[in-house]
Amino acid sequence: MERATISRQQQTQRAFLGAALMDPVRAREYIIKLVPGMFDEGVSRAVFSAVQQLTMAGEPVDTVINRASAGCPADVIRPGVVAMAETCPSVSNIGSYAAQILEDYRYSLLQGDLMKCMAKDAMDSDCVCRQLRRTLAVQDAIRSTQTDSTARDFDAVLDSALARLDEP
């Protein structure tokens, strides 16, 4: 019954996290390309952060509840982890889940930036154009880091993209 009350984005995040907990070896290539900010605040973000830390340290993800409890109480994490496992229809789809999480994140960034641009009182036309150029630069940076790299390279790509915007 709970599935009907959560969004598609939340279902995708839970399915990814469930798959990552069930098959951390397969999930590793996607875990290094995602960042905690791509997940909803609360249980999903805490669990992803814990899984990412454990995976990067080469430790088993079995202790995820203890590690994630640093961000949320364990009695909140436990049912969340169970729901993640139940939401994951197939571990083999983890790449699709990761791609959808990235796409949802990119869309939310676009939506937020466009809302800023639509606030006419806050910006003149030149400011709107600058904001749109920054938005596109960020989108290009995200896309380029996901193609052949990891999220760790994102800051370097973003800095160079934003530096180009400051040039006349």
Image (tube, rainbow, N blue to C red):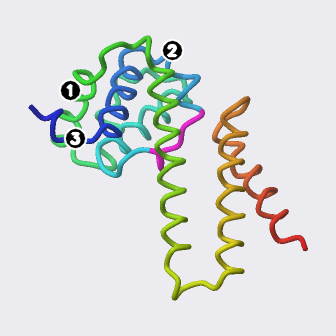
**Is residue 123 toward the left or the right of residue 133 in the image?**
left
Residue 146: say if magenta. no
Query: Which residue is drawn at the image coordinates 76% and 51% (left, top)?
Result: 156
Mark 2 residue crowding within 10 angstroms, few (<14) / some (14–19) / many (20+): few
User: Depth check: 40 or 70 in front?
Assistant: 40
Badge 3: residue crowd in 10 Å (few <14, some 14–19, many ≥20): few
Q: How many marks?
A: 3
Nearer the observer, disc 3 or disc 2? Answer: 3
For the residue labelled by badge 3, is the local secondary structure a helix, a strand or a loop? Answer: loop
Q: Is residue 159 above or below residue 97?
A: below
Residue at screen point 51% across, 21% down: 95
Q: Amino acid at mark 3?
A: Ile
Instruction: Read off the magenta span.
Output: 33-38
Q: Secondary structure at mark 1?
A: helix
> How packed is label 1: few (under 14 Cα within 10 Å), some, or many (20 or more)?
few
Between 4 and 26, the residue placed more toward the observer is 4
Q: Nearer the viewer, residue 92 or 27?
A: 92
Q: Amino acid at mark 1?
A: Val
Spatial distance from mark 2 to mark 1, Cα to Cα? 20 Å
Q: Which residue is mark 3?
A: 6
Instruction: Please state if 47 lies on the left or on the right of 123 as rendered.
Output: left
Estimate the x, y position of residue 80 in percent, counting from the top left. Answer: 22, 35
Q: Quadrant of residue 135?
A: bottom right
The label number, if any, that marks residue 82 in the structure image: 1
As drawn, 6 above or below 14:
below
Tell me whether circle 2 and circle 1 mark residues in contact (CB < 8 Å). Answer: no
Position of the N terminus, as image quadrant, is: top left
* Image quarter (top left, top right, bottom left or bottom right) of the C terminus: bottom right
Residue 16 placement (x, y as % from top left)? 39, 27
